[in-house]
Amino acid sequence: MSGPSENVRDAWLETKYCCTGCGCIFHYRFLERVEEGDDPERTNRRAISRARKDAPRDIPCPQCGRAAIPPFDTRSIPAAVTIALITMTLGVGAIYFWCSYSLNEVAGLGAAPLSCGAALVFLVCLWRSSNRPNAARLSKAERLIGKGTIRRVEHDADRIAYTRSGLLLARVCRVIAPIVGAVIFTVVGLSVPHLGSPYNPELVPAYVAPGDDFEFTFPNKIETIKAYWTGHPYWTGHPQIELLNSGEVGGGRQITGVGSNRGWPETIRTRKNEAFETSVNPTVKLNVPDDPAWEGKTLQLLVRMDVTHPKYMPGKGHYEVVTEAMEATFSVSLTTTETSRNLRLLWWTSGTLAGLCILVPPLATLAASIWAYRHRPELEIQITDAPPVSIKPD
């Protein structure tokens, strides 16, 4: 049995294009080889398949001169996803430093290059992929209209005006927002030591007032598996936090603190190329009593803590639980409660604003690409033997 008769011929296919810059919709004709048989529906499906594969990209828009794309072109989505992921990864890194080292210069040293890198990557990719009006493409579109290749141009004034205003606002926000976010992270983060007084560079946050919590990291390192360790700055029934100058500041109030109660499983698994042990500086979180009389005072503290952690035993294939004694003496210069409250408000407000400025533009770009594809004009392909008709100027 023989199948339906088919022949291959050259035919003119006409498909719809949409300009994402001004909203203009027009039709473009191009020559394509079409397999035509007795079944018109099958012929049409094959024509659509060929058009999806071979339809010319970047046809000039007759309204603004931008490069228009056919409705089924999805090339912009992978690019938008890549830009969004790179920018957001750098932005999340900057936010991590901002939250982990609040009111400390370390946050600025980490967040500044990451946020600047995020803004630079986003703006460079945005510039390279930007589809701007082009006089040469506009002239080409006029010639194609004269040849009859571009036809049925739909100039929807309301849609074009809405699209133009919306895209202009979006472009301004996308360009300015990452720069603003990087500037905030850089300026506020690196100027932390000069925002108030006194500044304690070894503490997080570096500005402490009566009633505040802060973290202190021991200068001693421990070698532990997967950064596991546990400790508490108390002996049984006896505090290990000692105020050395209690006579100067006025004793009677207890400074409290906690270490880590993070446990570990009985069997610790490591990856093939993962180091068995990691160097860790244990951290203790302390609380200053809420005593207004301590404002402006300097506390001399002695902190002792027994740190328990798993230690890998070479050649034995297992770990043993060991305990190491930690001890450190440091000073804490207290600021006023009002200064501490204002600086914390400034820090978290500026960090939130900067984080939004860094993260929102790539998310908006990705969402806009997906929305434009989901709301693309309906695919229209027509098969005709008639060539384009040239339009003679009046």
Image (cartoon, grey):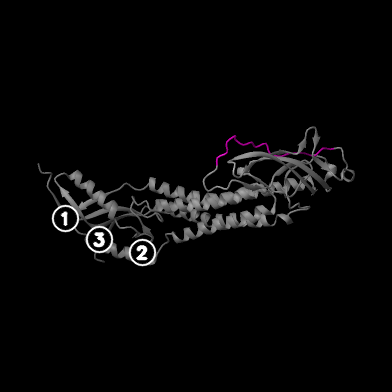
Give the label on residue 9, or none: 1
Q: Is residue 180 visible?
A: no
Q: Please identify the quadrant where the C terminus is shown.
A: bottom left
Q: CA distance from mark 3 to mark 1?
A: 21 Å
Q: Residue 348: image x %, image y %?
A: 66, 47
Name the residue type under label 2.
Leu
Q: Nearer the viewer, mark 3 or mark 1?
A: 1
Which numbered disc flags the more N-terminal residue, 1 or 2? 1
First to last magenta residue range: 253-269
Can you see residue 245? yes
Could you say which is closer to the camera, residue 106 or residue 337?
Answer: 106
Residue 389, given in percent of the width and then of the height, sits at: 21, 61
Label 1 Cα crowd, 10 Å radius (few <14 / some 14-19 / many 20+): few
Q: Identify the disc placed on residue 148.
A: 3
Q: Which residue is at the front of the view, 217 or 129? A: 217
Q: CA distance from mark 1 to mark 2?
A: 32 Å
Q: Is residue 327 left or right of residue 356?
A: right
Please state which of the two labelled residues, at mark 1 or mark 2, is closer to the viewer: 1
Label 2 sits on residue: 138
In this rendering, position of residue 195 left or right of residue 247: left
Question: Residue 245: where, in percent of width, then height?
Answer: 87, 45
Q: Residue at x 51, y 46 (%)?
A: 272
Say what secondary structure mark 1 lies in: strand
Give the distance between the C-alpha atoms of the residues marked 2 and 3, in whole angstroms.
Answer: 15 Å
User: Would you call the spot at circle 2 few (<14 residues within 10 Å), some (14-19), or many (20 or more)?
Assistant: some
